[in-house]
Amino acid sequence: MKKLLLLACLALPSPANAQAVAFTTEDYAPFNYREGKVIKGATVEQVEKVMAAIGIDYTIEVMPWARAFSLARTAPMTCVFATAHNSARDPLFKWVEPLLIDRNILITRKGSGVTAGNLEEAKKYTIGTQREDYTETILKEKGFTKLDVATDFNATLRKLLSGRIDMMPISELYFEKLKADQPVEIVTVLSSQPMGIACEKSFPDDLRAKMQAALDKLIADGDQRQIFLKYGMNLSQ
C-alpha cells in the first residue's frame, strides 16, 4: 500500500509545474521575434526578467497574432503580450502593465504620393493591418472602411513596400528603427495606448500581483528603459 501511495504522489504535478505560465506573442521585431531558434526582443526580455524575479516556470511561443490572442482569451494560465490595453479589451483579461506606452502612427512608402493631414483625409486610402490586432479595431472604430487584413505584421509591411496598400499602422517606437532599413515615412498619428501582458480571466490574482510588482520594480530601477535603448528605441519622445 505504501508503494502504491508513493507512486500516486510521484504522478501528481509539482507546485511549480502547476503554476507554469504559457506566454504567447507574435513576430514583431524589435519587441518580440525569433532569431534562429531564440525568441528575443524588448518585451520578451521584460517578461523573462519579471518571471525570473518571481521564480515561476514559463514558456514563450511565437505565433500569428490572432491565435496568440485567442489562446489568452480561452486557455487557463495563458498570457499574451504586448497587448494594447483599451476599453474594449479591459474586461477580457487580467493585466500586467505597462511593457511600454506607445503611439501608433500611419506610415507609407517613400515616394508613394500618399498624403493626409488628419485621419479623415487618410480614410480615402487602403490601410493594411493584421487580423485580430488592436489596430484593426481602432481603424474600424474611427470609421476606416478600406482595410486590407493580413495574417501578421511582416505580411502587411511587404504589401506596403510593394505598393499593394497605401498605409499601415505601426508603433512609433519601432518606426525610428524601421526607417533606417526601409523606405518609409510618417503620414499621421492614429492612436496612443499602454501595452501590457494580458492574462486569461481565471489567472490567479496573487500571481498577477507578483508579476506586476516585479514589472514595477523593473521600471523604477531604470531597467526597462535600458532594454529599449539596447534595441535601438528612443524613449525621449
Image (tube, rainbow, N blue to C red):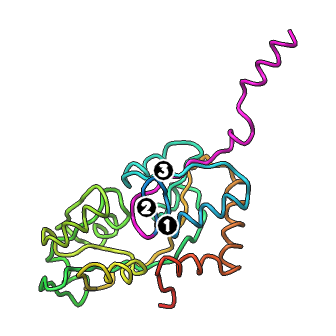
Query: How many other residues sit within 10 Å of disc 2, few (<14), some (14-19) or many (≥20)?
Result: many
Residue for badge 2: 33
Identify the mark at residue 4; answer none if there is no mark.
none
Q: Pick whichever, 6 or 196, lies toward us.
A: 6
> Which quadrant of the view contains residue 223?
bottom right
- Relative placement, left or right, of 160 versus 76 is left
In the rendered image, residue 165 lying in the magenta stretch gets the answer no
In the picture, measured across the screen, residue 189 lies left or right of residue 83, that is left
Report the amino acid beneath label 3.
Answer: Glu
Residue count near mark 3 (Cα–Cα under 10 Å), binned few <14, some 14–19, many ≥20? some
**Residue at x-position 46% and y-position 63%:** 32
Q: Could you tell me which secondary element the residue under label 3 belongs to?
A: strand
Q: Are marks 3 and 1 in contact (CB under 8 Å)?
A: no
* Residue 104: x %, y % from top left: 37, 77
- Decide which of 5, 98 is in the foreground and name it: 5
Give the residues drawn in magenta, as a range: 1-30
What amino acid type is highlighted by mark number 2?
Tyr
In the rendered image, the vertical position of residue 228 relative to residue 140, given as above or below: below
Give the residue number, with chain letter if any, for mark 1. 41
The residue at which mark 3 appears reads as 61
Q: Are marks 2 and 1 in contact (CB under 8 Å)?
A: yes
192 relative to 80, above or below: below
**Of label 3 and label 1, which has the lower sequence position?**
1
Q: Indicate left or right for 204 with 75 as reference.
A: right
Amino acid under disc 1: Gly
